[in-house]
Image (spheres, helix red, strand yellow):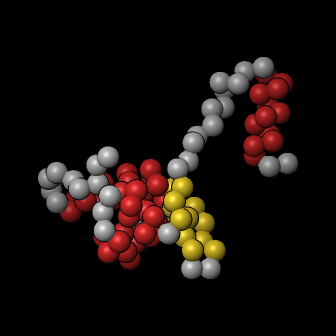
């Protein structure tokens, strides 16, 4: 039984669909697509990835293809850039 099936079973037993709300994940595939979502350059995403900032936002890696959780990547990048720029305005706002 996978997690989603287990949650559906719990909802059915308790009759409460609000007990386990599903988190909607916006995923993007590849550095170029993530750069478009963050509205920054590919080189900025490559730099953030090389420095390990985006490691927690990686959902899966299949070969050379990387799938990112876009919102988590945005939060991680903003935190990193805030620390780096001492609280100045950030480029990655939507």
In the picture provided, is 13 more to the left or to the right than 88? right
In the picture provided, is 81 more to the left or to the right than 37? left
Residue pictured at 31% horizontal, 68% vertical: 41
Q: Is residue 60 above or below residue 3?
A: below
The image quarter in which residue 59 lies = bottom right
Q: Residue 6: x and y, percent?
A: 80, 40
Q: Residue 21: x and y, percent?
A: 63, 32
Residue pictured at 32% horizontal, 58% vertical: 39
Res. 38 visible in picture: yes
Count of numbered badges drawn on the protein: 0
Q: Residue 5: x and y, percent?
A: 81, 42
Residue lying at the far bottom of the rendered structure: 63
Q: Is residue 28 above or below residue 8?
A: below
The image quarter in which residue 18 lies = top right
Q: Residue 10: x and y, percent?
A: 79, 31
Most foreground residue, 34 or 80: 34
Residue pictured at 15% horizontal, 56% vertical: 86
Most foreground residue, 5 or 93: 93
Q: Is residue 2 above or below residue 83?
A: above
Residue pictured at 82% horizontal, 26% vertical: 12
Res. 56 visible in picture: no
């Amino acid at each position: 039984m996978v997690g989603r099936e287990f949650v559906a079973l719990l909802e059915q037993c308790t009759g409460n669909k609000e007990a386990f709300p599903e988190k909607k994940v916006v995923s993007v595939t590849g550095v170029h697509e993530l750069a478009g979502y963050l509205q920054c350059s590919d080189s900025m995403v490559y730099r953030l990835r090389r420095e390990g900032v985006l490691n927690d936002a990686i959902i899966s890696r299949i070969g050379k293809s990387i799938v990112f959780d876009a919102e988590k990547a945005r939060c991680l990048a903003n935190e990193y850039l805030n620390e780096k720029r001492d609280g100045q305005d950030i480029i990655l706002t939507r």
